[in-house]
Amino acid sequence: MSFPHGPHFDRLALFAFNFSNVGRWKGASSFQRRPALWAHHYVADRVGPTFGWDTSRISADDIESFVSNDERYVGKTTRKLSTNLNYLYKVGRLDGYRSPKPERWWLSSLFLALDRSVKPDQIGAGKLADAALMGELMRSGFGAIGGKRSVAKDIAAGYFTSLYGVCGGLGRFVEEAVQDRERLLIPSLIPNEPPAGGKIGVFHPTNPTARNAIPNICKVLAKYAAGFELFDAENLDDFNIESYIKSQTESALRSLKQLGVKPAISSDDLTRLTRGE
């Protein structure tokens, strides 16, 4: 809601549709909690494992064949369902799910999957809590519908799942809940001033290409409890990674120089070692 409409929003909306977990409400039947399971299973059981996320193979005919031959489907309108779903996947940019990069929509989808699977009072602190959240993420079905898997995504999932826990899950939207997490996780730190509303951009220093925005009230937790870097959310899509890496390298070299650390071998010796000479 904080950014203009674009491909990221379309892919996130499509993930929410495929995830098909809208919760419970008074007067609702049990099956209404998962209103689009036919879409969920087509992606989880066919597009991912059979097509390898090659979305060019998706067609209304293929969707109709999949649904018609699946005993879990009991409806009578397979053709209309198939043509509508095929159209939705095209305009919703499902083709972008092939990317190996942990893009904004993917990171937001990770948070959405956890939001709909984990209650705030289930979130603890520390490595065991992170492992529990990763378990919940896997059980939610996120991996089956979240696009092509990659090492970059696996690494980002670990860091951003930890960030989710640090910020208190859904509690990240409530200032009082965020303050409780601060007192629990960083009791020695007293913020200089209350954070303003809006969003703040974040990324972990080990992977600055995986960037997303979180509520600004969580920035202290993100920085001091999760080790994330902060930047202006307006620069989310055009953050200068090369400049960041250069500044971090220069800072590290200055620190080594101040500590009096010097190389024990020459550059020529290092070259010979790495070349096996």
Image (cartoon, grey):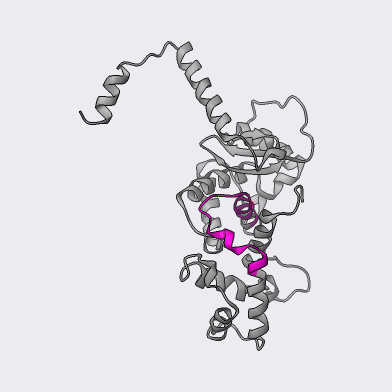
Q: Position of residue 247 (x, y in %)?
A: 56, 25
Q: Is residue 96 magenta?
A: yes
Q: Residue at x 49, y 46 (%)?
A: 155
The residue closer to the viewer here, 157 or 119, is 157
Q: Is residue 251 magenta?
A: no
Q: Residue at x 67, y 56 (%)?
A: 7
Q: Main secondary structure of the magenta part?
A: helix
The residue closer to the viewer here, 171 or 272, is 272
The residue closer to the viewer here, 249 or 110, is 249
Q: Which quadrant holds residue 197?
A: top right
Q: Residue at x 60, y 45 (%)?
A: 165
Indicate the quadrant containing the C terminus: top left, top right, bottom left or bottom right.
top left
Q: Is residue 213 above or below residue 262?
A: below
The residue range painted magenta reads 89-112
Left or right of 130 on screen, residue 1? right
Q: Position of residue 83 (x, y in %)?
A: 65, 79
Left or right of 221 on screen, residue 247? left
